[in-house]
């Protein structure tokens, strides 16, 4: 009964404070529900994207002596199989072609026999380049080695048997060659096997005619695989999907009883995706949790701003016989009221945010996931309310005397944590943890290949988390010390606002330093959160663009078809296309480094840096400009990958002899280069190993200046639109790709996850938090001091003089919070980017600072403070007796 | 002091120029059916150096009248003026000092700063204001409380400091709204003592609202308020 009366009284008389506390809970609930549901939806997207990137889900290899038909029927009958087709593999001793009067031969290779319907079932496996799409098809590099083209005849060598001649119908590219020619059943952690250099595809019937005799004589030279496409009805979480798929693969192997091994391409891809998903989880944790904690702190601050009143009310209730238990019960009722209201409001906010940011109230996650996150967020909201309202009420009821409860300012010294230097301890610990976790070789997410277990080193999160908390406490300490010991200085600073009242205002602020320092700390934490989140997201976005640029090469890339020879002058026609700012030709050759075949890029060092926006992060041991200048100064200089340096134990200026194909004779010849530096990434280059040299030197050495690709800079114009223009000019003679399309199709990196929705949500909440941390806290503090202002007015204080109290404190809190928060945000952003370096590919060379957004945060904070101050002063204009009577 | 109900002032003493003049003064709170008439048709003068008690039961309109006299509130009927003190805007801080019923010291300021505040609000420089505050505290024997915070004072001490704050401003009219309402008998008597001392020292008029007959008896004159109406009564002169 007392409880109901109390609640009715609170609603009638303290509606403002109740609403503000509920709003704090609502922000926390809304943020968690939004981010959680978005995380679930993102994971599901990652699973779908990873699964769709796989062409052949499983390659089931029949073991020697196994009955191929039985393996096929068992595989096809396994659960979850959509289609299963047999593919024959035959080993050839080599190919030979006679073209233009010269005989070209290759080393050993592989001939595949493909059944009817293979290409329509697995469309991503083979890409047509020239000639017919069916019949005998030569892989691109094999065609280049043999100088063969559609219409030519080549011979297939068979061990111990006579070679067989076949007519080449077309030339194709094998985008999935790495998995297609994988060693099925290789032990976990084994080095991946390089695909064969020489490959030929032919219809299954023709393959059997060619290789059945070989199979009879040398069964070890032929194998049969079942290529499988599974139904992609997978759990949303990549980790769960991986477990499902790998369990199914093991189940099939059991069914095959040793007659077949499963090469689980889908599982491997999902394995990579699950570590990406875990990274995403860490990312959301990093970026979302501080916001929710901040909302909780704000709720506590709002509740605490009414603490004096609550203590007085408790004192009154005590004098009328209320027990501690009664007082605690009333606190719990209030907590449940604000927690429940905040939770309902927060879930409503999350639904609205979802509708606005993602077009759906459940963020694309399943209903059950959305409900789970909603319930979890609501429980979190209730917990915040209990901690912010009920626990302080319990503490006061238990510990305070009636007299102590009436105290509002007190002479309490520095809090215990400050005396023991907890803030310094946290910051030093954060620095140590950061140092330990950001050293080279540290892996935040560990997803061992072939095992279902994945792990995140949450320890690494401790660095930024401790730094954030330490920054908040340090801001509290700085504000506290300035107010306690710098009263004279403060009076001088605020004299422009306060005139003759400066010392009195400074004294007032100094005595209320705990409250003012709390406000400064809250603003600092909020600004640091908003700034670090914004900078991180901005840097993430920047690197996603860099990643896409790296993959695509430039805004628009024109890749010449194999077999065509285009000179650098061919770029002149491209330069005339509207929207093209500059054209940079890049040579592309294949070169043997020892037995390794690597991509060699011939560049013009003097123009490539500006034309292709080369990033410093692409290189090691110097900036992009420095390394290109070095290459320009050394005509036979060679930049190699880190892996090559290690494999061949290279030291600077070591001679590296490459075997390059001569453009005229088509023969491979030795060309000396000198190793001068390391390139980690290069536009259009593969990740593992490649070489960069001077185009002029390569031209001289290979007797051809043929360009592999033209990189087009379209600054100021849409790459997609310019690409369309370029296509209309070059037709089918070259492949034209653009940055925007490339950004969407990159599937191997986390940067492919579109964070724009999450960014909008987080940055929106950060703005709300900034407004709440400044305006709301000050407004409630001012509301609690209405009596003080009314008395001052009754004593004759003019509005301007009341304003000097209001504005001095507001300015101190806002400026202090903004400056300390900006500093903390910058440090945190640096830490986040470093700790989450695995998210970035390539790592950023500098942070991207979204000045516009940060300006908006500052503007919102200042506007909220101005509104709170204006409201306080407006209230002070009321007749003081009216205010005193109302209070 | 001159009072009348619904008529012009009956007499003027002891000065020809009253500090406050009220004619047909009324104050109604709210409107319509819920309106509460707190004061009704009050006509009175407050003369310089007068000391009077405003008595009446709770809700009789004592505080309302005191707030109107202090310029803290505006009447809804009749007129009020301060012929010897100036315009309403110039009353505080300045010629009018007010002692409130409840705690009226600003919590974040110490006793000296609280006492100096009206002087600072009036534009007195800090050194002079602080000196004035110390003098006022010393006059009332409160100089040892100067560095204390309001929450460290007893109720009686806080009210005496509030009186010192009035004294520091050297007003010509002191208005005290039930200054002993929340104090025990001994503390209340001490507060009244210092109020009378302060008013006498300053030569200021003193109007104290109270429902304590014993306290009222210590004042030179008394006014009776009942249901918002000011009763004309004979002056008493039983100052102790």
Image (cartoon, coloured by chain):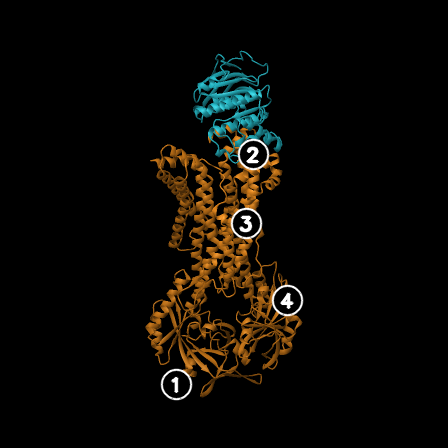
Chain colours: A orange, B cyan
Identify residue for label 2.
Answer: A802
A284 in relation to A492, above or below? below
Q: Answer few, some or many: residues within 10 Å of disc 1's Cα (few below 14, many 20 plus, some between 14 and 19).
A: few
Q: Using residue B183 as the reference point, say whether residue A711 is left or right of it.
A: right
Q: Counting residues from the N terminus, which is met first, the one under dot 2 or under dot 4?
A: 4
The reply to whether residue B28 is visible in this rendering is: no
Q: CA distance from mark 1 to mark 4?
A: 60 Å
Per the rendering, the mark at residue A821 is: 3
* Mark found first going from the N terminus, 1 or 3: 1
- Pointers 1 and 3 within a single chain: yes
What residue did someone put label 1 on?
A216
Instruction: Check disc 1 and report its element: helix, strand or loop.
Output: helix
Task: From the top left corner, tell me how far across and down residue A585 is, in percent.
Answer: 62, 69
At label 3, counting other C-alpha atoms closer than 10 Å, the crowd grade (few under 14, some 14-19, many 20 or more) is many
Within 10 Å of the Cα at label 2, are there few (<14), some (14-19), or many (20+) other Cα atoms? many
Q: Earlier in the sequence, mark 1 or mark 4?
A: 1
Which label's residue is closer to the chain start, 2 or 1? 1
Report, in whole angstroms, how far the alpha carbon at label 2 lies from the one at label 3: 28 Å
Residue A475 position within the rendered picture, expressed as x and y whole percent measured from the top left: 53, 48
Task: Find out whether the residues at labels 3 and 4 contact each other: C-beta distance under 8 Å.
Answer: no
Q: How far is mark 3 from mark 4, CA to CA? A: 36 Å
Disc nearer the start of the sequence (2/3): 2
Secondary structure state at the residue bearing disc 2: helix
**Spatial distance from mark 2 to mark 4, Cα to Cα?**
61 Å
Residue A626's disc number: 4
Q: Chain of mark 2?
A: A
Q: Foreground mark, 1 or 3?
A: 3
Q: Earlier in the sequence, mark 3 or mark 4?
A: 4
């Amino acid at each position: 009964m007392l409880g109901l009366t109390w609640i009715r009284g609170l609603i009638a008389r303290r509606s403002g404070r109740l609403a503000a506390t509920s709003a704090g809970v609502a922000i926390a609930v809304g943020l968690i529900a939004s981010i959680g549901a978005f995380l679930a939806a993102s994971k599901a997207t990652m699973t779908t994207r990873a699964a769709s990137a796989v062409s052949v889900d499983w390659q089931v290899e029949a073991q020697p002596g196994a009955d191929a038909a039985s393996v096929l029927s068992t595989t096809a009958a396994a659960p979850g199989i959509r289609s299963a087709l047999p593919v024959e593999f035959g080993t050839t001793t080599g190919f030979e072609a006679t073209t233009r009067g010269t005989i070209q031969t290759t080393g050993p290779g592989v001939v595949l026999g493909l059944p009817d319907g293979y290409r329509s079932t697995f469309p991503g496996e083979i890409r047509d380049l020239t000639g017919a799409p069916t019949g005998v098809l030569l892989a691109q590099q094999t065609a280049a080695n043999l100088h063969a083209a559609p219409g030519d005849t080549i011979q297939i060598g068979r061990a111990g048997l006579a070679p067989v001649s076949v007519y080449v119908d077309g030339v194709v590219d094998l985008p999935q060659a790495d998995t297609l020619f994988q060693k099925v059943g290789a032990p976990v952690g084994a080095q991946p096997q390089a695909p064969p250099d020489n490959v030929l595809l032919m219809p299954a019937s023709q393959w059997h005619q060619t290789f059945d005799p070989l199979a009879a004589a040398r069964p070890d030279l032929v194998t049969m695989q079942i290529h499988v496409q599974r139904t992609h009805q997978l759990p949303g979480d990549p980790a769960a999907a991986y477990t499902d798929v790998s369990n199914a693969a093991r189940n099939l192997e059991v069914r095959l009883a040793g007659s077949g091994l499963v090469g689980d391409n889908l599982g491997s891809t999902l394995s990579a995706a699950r570590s990406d998903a875990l990274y995403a989880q860490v990312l959301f944790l990093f970026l979302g949790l501080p916001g929710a904690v901040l909302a909780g702190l704000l709720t506590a601050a709002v509740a605490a701003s009414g603490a004096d009143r609550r203590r007085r009310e408790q004192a009154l209730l005590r004098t009328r016989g209320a027990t501690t238990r009664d007082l605690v019960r009333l606190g719990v009722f209030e907590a449940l009221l604000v927690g429940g209201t905040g939770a309902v409001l927060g879930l409503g906010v999350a639904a609205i945010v979802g509708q606005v940011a993602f077009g759906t109230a459940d963020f694309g996650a399943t209903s059950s996931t959305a409900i789970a996150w909603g319930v979890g967020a609501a429980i979190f909201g209730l917990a915040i309310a209990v901690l912010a309202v009920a626990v302080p009420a319990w503490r006061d009821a238990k510990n305070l005397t009636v007299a102590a409860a009436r105290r509002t300012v007190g002479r309490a010294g520095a809090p215990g944590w400050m005396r023991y230097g907890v803030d310094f301890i946290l910051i030093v610990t954060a620095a140590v943890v950061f140092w330990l976790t950001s050293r080279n070789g540290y892996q935040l997410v560990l997803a061992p290949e072939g095992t279902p277990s994945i792990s995140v080193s949450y320890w690494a999160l401790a660095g930024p988390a401790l730094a954030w908390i330490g920054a908040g406490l340090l801001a509290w300490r700085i504000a506290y010390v300035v107010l306690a010991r710098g009263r004279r200085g403060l009076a001088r600073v605020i004299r422009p606002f306060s005139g003759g009242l400066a010392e009195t205002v400074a004294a007032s602020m100094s005595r209320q330093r705990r409250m003012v320092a709390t406000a400064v700390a809250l603003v600092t934490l909020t600004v640091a959160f908003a700034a670090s989140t914004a900078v991180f997201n901005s840097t993430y976005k920047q690197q996603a663009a860099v990643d896409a640029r790296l993959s695509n090469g430039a805004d628009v890339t024109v890749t010449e078809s194999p077999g065509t020879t285009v000179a650098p002058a061919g770029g002149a026609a491209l330069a005339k296309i509207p929207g093209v700012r500059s054209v940079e030709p890049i040579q592309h050759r294949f070169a043997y480094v020892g037995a390794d075949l690597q991509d060699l890029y011939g560049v013009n060092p003097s123009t490539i840096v500006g034309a292709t926006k080369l990033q410093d992060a692409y290189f090691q041991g110097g900036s992009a400009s420095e390394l290109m200048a070095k290459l320009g100064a050394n005509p036979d200089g060679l930049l190699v990958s880190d892996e090559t340096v290690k494999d061949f134990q290279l030291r600077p200026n070591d001679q590296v002899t490459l075997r390059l194909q001569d453009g005229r004779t088509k023969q491979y010849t030795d060309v000396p280069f000198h190793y001068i530096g390391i390139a980690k990434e290069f536009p259009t280059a593969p990740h593992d190993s490649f070489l960069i040299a001077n185009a002029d030197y390569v031209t001289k050495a290979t007797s051809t200046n043929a360009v592999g690709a033209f990189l087009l800079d379209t600054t100021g114009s849409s790459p997609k639109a310019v690409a369309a223009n370029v296509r209309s000019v070059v037709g089918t003679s070259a492949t034209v790709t653009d940055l925007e399309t490339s950004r969407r199709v990159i599937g191997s990196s986390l940067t492919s996850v579109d964070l724009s929705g999450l960014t909008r949500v987080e940055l929106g909440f950060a703005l709300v938090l900034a407004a709440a941390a400044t305006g709301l806290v000050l407004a409630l503090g001012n509301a609690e001091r209405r009596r003080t202002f009314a008395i001052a007015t009754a004593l004759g204080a003019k509005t301007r003089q009341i304003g000097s109290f209001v504005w001095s404190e507001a300015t101190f809190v806002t400026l202090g919070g903004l400056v300390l928060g900006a500093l903390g945000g910058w440090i945190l952003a640096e830490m986040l980017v470093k700790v989450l370096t695995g998210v970035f590919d390539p790592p950023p060379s500098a942070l991207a600072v979204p000045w516009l957004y940060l300006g908006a945060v500052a503007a919102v904070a200042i506007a909220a403070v101005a509104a709170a101050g204006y409201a306080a002063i407006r209230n002070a204009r009321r007749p003081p007796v009216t205010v005193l009577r109302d209070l | 002091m001159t009072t009348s109900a619904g008529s012009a002032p009956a007499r003027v003493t002891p000065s020809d120029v009253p500090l406050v003049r009220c004619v047909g003064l009324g104050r109604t709170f709210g409107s319509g059916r819920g309106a509460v008439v707190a004061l009704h048709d009050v006509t009175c003068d407050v003369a310089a150096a007068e000391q009077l008690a405003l008595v009446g039961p709770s809700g009789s309109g004592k505080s309302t009248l005191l707030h109107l006299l202090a310029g803290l509130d505006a009447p809804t009927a009749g007129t009020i003026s301060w012929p010897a003190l100036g315009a309403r805007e110039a009353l505080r801080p300045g010629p009018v000092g007010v002692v409130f019923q409840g705690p009226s010291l600003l919590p974040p300021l110490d006793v000296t700063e609280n006492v100096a505040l009206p002087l600072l609000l009036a534009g007195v420089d800090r050194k002079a204001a602080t000196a004035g505050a110390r003098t006022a505290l010393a006059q009332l024997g409160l100089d040892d409380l100067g560095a204390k915070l309001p929450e460290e004072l007893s109720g009686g001490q806080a009210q005496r400091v509030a009186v010192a704050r009035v004294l520091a401003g050297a007003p010509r009219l002191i208005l005290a709204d039930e200054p002993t309402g929340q104090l025990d008998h001994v503390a209340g008597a001490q507060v009244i003592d210092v109020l009378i001392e302060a008013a006498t020292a300053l030569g200021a008029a003193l109007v104290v609202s109270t429902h304590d007959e014993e306290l009222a008896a210590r004042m030179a004159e008394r006014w009776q308020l009942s249901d918002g109406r000011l009763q004309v009564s004979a002056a008493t002169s039983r100052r102790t």
